[in-house]
Image (tube, rainbow, N blue to C red):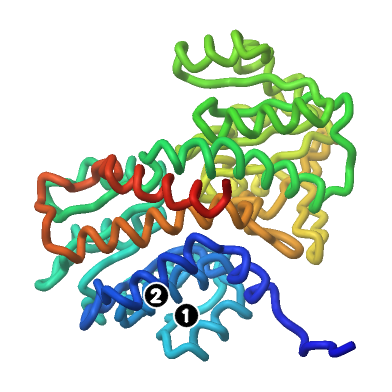
Amino acid sequence: MTISPSHSRIDWVSNSCSLLRETAGDFARTRPFEGLTIGTAIHLEPKTAALLMALKAGGARLVATGNLNSTQLETVAYLRFHDMEVIGGQTTDETTHGDFIDALLDRKPDLLLDNGGDLFARVAERPYNGLLGGTEETTSGRTRLAPLRGRIALPILVINDSPIKQFAENRHAVGQSLFESYMRFTNRSTNGKRVTVFGYGACGKGTAACFRSAYSTVSVVDIDPVATLEAHLDGFSTPLRDEAIRSADVIVTVTGFPAILNAPDFGLLKDGVILINGGHFPREIDVEALRAAAAQIDTYAGDGIDTVHLSDGRRIHILGGGHMANLAGPRPLGNSVESMDLGFTLQARCLERVASGKLDASMCVVPVPGDIDAMVASAYLNLNR
């Protein structure tokens, strides 16, 4: 028997991304990014490496930086080995991260692949000639960039507004990965736990369903009465906000908006409650205010858990410092390979469309064109039927 050399998780993920591999083969023939530089600010983890390798196959020069708290050093080394420029490294400091964004934009990429709006929000402040446009991955980014349309005035296709992204990644994969993250951080059961999920968009639906399937009693809170009604008709408890907080053993935020759980809510929290964020930015739970209110903080550094002791004796457990939990803490894996294979193929095809020059400023912060959705769905089905 012959034993092959050890392979990394990047190899495992790359070999599992069948749709991106097929797309890379197509790009190698058509070279849609020949002579162009693509700048990316996205989680630098193994699945991202597969995406960037596909773009490189299409002739692109890549310059990349990460998002807050999610950059993985093995991925950085892999990208650099493959002649991609990577700016900065792992950081939780927003000023340092902003410096990385500025350094990337100093290279004046022709296309931008954004995740959370960090790149395009800065472009609105400091535009430069030659930028063709790009993509934005998230709901958080779309919310941030929509008011800046007039200042940006370039085509930006929002991947999160694709129905494929909504059901494949947000509903199915985010729910699975947040449940996995809860187990990975805590090693505690979910059976009989009272779980409150803030947000009943696609991510919230998947999260609520996964915890319910794990024998938790799940409540849902959403500011939209229509979404709350849907949660009610889906069989979830929909108590008023204060009661949903007061009764929870676990609180999960998946809204894409800041200050979902903040200082006025701390008096409602149950002793021993676990707080976990699945939103892109680490602001859905006001962790700094909670730390400021602490009489004592126990940090389980290797496990990514902070226990805040309040003066009245209650203990509040925060996972991953309030950062996006599925890419924080010990051995963070993120969303499933298959979901990201679909989502990142949407990214690649949307960048191909922007690079073609066929879009104009009227396509600034708009959903993925329907023909791209259909192309990606058909290609995935052809590979997996």
Q: Nearer the viewer, residue 226 or 249?
A: 226
Q: Horizontal and vertical percent for residue 111? A: 24, 68
Q: Nearer the viewer, residue 25 or 238?
A: 25
- How packed mark 2 is, by other alpha carbons closer than 10 Å (few <14, some 14-19, many 20 or more), is many
Q: Horizontal and vertical percent for residue 209? A: 68, 28
Q: Horizontal and vertical percent for residue 340? A: 53, 55
Residue 99 visible (yes or no): no
Q: Which residue is drawn at 28% across and 40% down?
A: 370
Above or below 48: residue 239: above
Q: Which mark is residue 100?
A: 2
Q: Which residue is drawn at 69% across and 32% down?
A: 251
What kind of element bears circle 2?
helix
Measured in 3D between alpha carbons, the distance from the residue under mark 1 to the one under mark 2, in whole angstroms, is: 6 Å
Residue annotated with mark 1: 88
Q: Which mark is residue 342?
A: none
Q: What residue type is labelled 2?
A: Phe
Q: Which residue is drawn at 37% across and 57% down?
A: 347
Precedes in sequence: disc 1 or disc 2: 1
Q: Which amino acid does label 1 sit on?
A: Gly
Q: Which of 351 and 64 is in front in this view?
A: 351
